Image (spheres, rainbow, N blue to C red):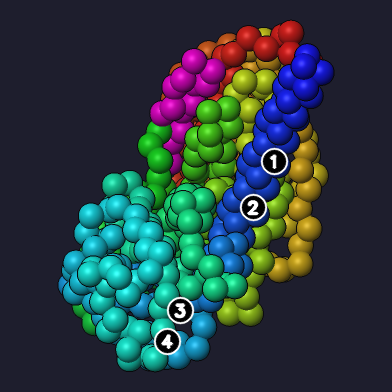
Amino acid sequence: MFIIIAIALLGAALSYALAVIWKLNLERSRTTTLMDIGLRLSSTIKRKELLEIIMATTARTLHAEGTSIILVDEKTKELYFEVATGEKNDEIKQIRLKAGEGIAGLVASTGESVLIADVSKDERWSNRVSAKVKIPTRNMICVPVRSNGKTLGVLQVINKKGKRAFNGQDLRLLEMISSPAAIALENMLLYEALLESMENLRITTAVKERMESEMKIAKEIQHSFLPGEVLRTAEIDLNACLIPAREVGGDFYHFIQLDENRLLVCLGDVSDKGMPAALFMSGLMIWIKAKASGNHSPATIIGQINREISTEDSTMFATIFLAILNTKTGKMSYCDGGHCTPYVLSGDKISELHGVKSLPIGIFSDTEYKDCEIQLHSGDSIVLYTDGITEAENANGEWFGTERLRQTLQHITDKSPAIITETLRQEVLLFSNYYAQSDDIAMMIIKYLAHNDNIS
């Protein structure tokens, strides 16, 4: 009797262990799949390529016969099929749904996902799409694609392969896919809005030939992409400033909190000034935001952006320094795309942050970029700047120079980023004696505050 009980208990324990192992393997596989999807979606912000990637990836992941991304028209609030996989794609693209119409309209208006095992038995189903393209629909999942509380569209899969029906696990997986899809779509829409602004501005300025209007619009565009001037957390004190030589310029900086422990910072200088440089800079800011969402290294981010913007028609390029700082450990990986060499302030010491210098972005699409790494300790600061400081001129044609910059920093190594930034600005003004500024100036100072001395 005892042997039978023991065997039964052993069998139950074995079954439980197998179930746990199966669940762990499933979660691991799902995590790997989502990471792969995130990397794929961060590869581009061009509409046709991005939407096709979303559709192909979704269809493959959920073993669906057909998939579609249905976007919300901001002006009419209608839904329209931008891309659909499977046959009859051209017919599908011509269909627009009113707000609330069909399953897609319902999901877009309520923001709630829908799983239908048999559409023929669901009164909410509208067969206007399937009837027009003669594609019978058996079952489907439809989930909202939302970003910052706003519905950008819906993601829909139909007819699970093998004559099976979608289940709750499929629904949860599609909802997970919708999150990186929303980020990718938002970046795409931002980029398209910028391109539209650029085209509208080109037309407007060509007709009106009013430089004042051009500069005002460009300044608004430029400042809308800057993240602000200050970032203060328990681990980081950051201060940045941008002083264009004209009303707008080509210098830029950016910082993005990638997650709880990673901060991306970058600073760069576009080869031109004024309106063209400001618009080129704005495009770079969107590319940086898009590529940063893919968990890439600094060299990978810069390399991918370089390939996107290095075309035969391109007439501009930009130097760039981009780094990702682990705010918990103090380790910072960085890549130098032909930019001014940063300085490291540690205690009363000042040193150059040397790395592998590569060409600026936008020159050759096959340029290789390398990652370097530095370990920061509590109180260390990184000084990023553009050549508008070192090449600032006075009335005698003399430059401020790197040696004068180094001497200025030597006296303020332990100061806050705000004080360092303001001191440098005042020193440049004093040196030039308010002589006309010939180049844009950008600065960013990052001070690491966390105590990490015991971290290996």
Instruction: Give coordinates of residue 113: x percent, y percent.
Output: 34, 55
Residue at x-position 49% and y-position 15%: 234
- The amino acid marked with disc number 3 is Ala
Return the disc, 2 or 1, that comes first in the chain's sequence: 1
Q: Is residue 336 above or below residue 273?
A: above
Q: Are marks 4 and 2 in contact (CB under 8 Å)?
A: no
Q: Which residues are magenta?
A: 230-242
Q: Nearer the viewer, residue 317 or 326?
A: 326
- The image quadrant of residue 433 is top left
Q: Secondary structure at mark 1?
A: helix
> Please, what is the three-letter code of the amino acid marked with disc 2?
Thr
Please give the label number shown on residue 135: 4
Location of residue 120 (image quadrant): bottom left
The disc placed on residue 22 is: 1
Kindly state the secondary structure of the residue where label 4 is placed.
loop
Comparing marks 1 and 4, which lies closer to the viewer? 1
Residue corresponding to mark 2: 33
Q: Residue at x 60, y 56 (%)?
A: 37
* Prevailing secondary structure of the magenta residues: strand
Q: Quadrant of the N terminus?
A: top right
Alpha carbon separation for disc pair 1 and 3: 34 Å
Q: Residue at x 58, y 27 (%)?
A: 261
Could you tell me which secondary element the residue under label 2 belongs to?
A: helix
Residue type pointed to by label 1:
Trp
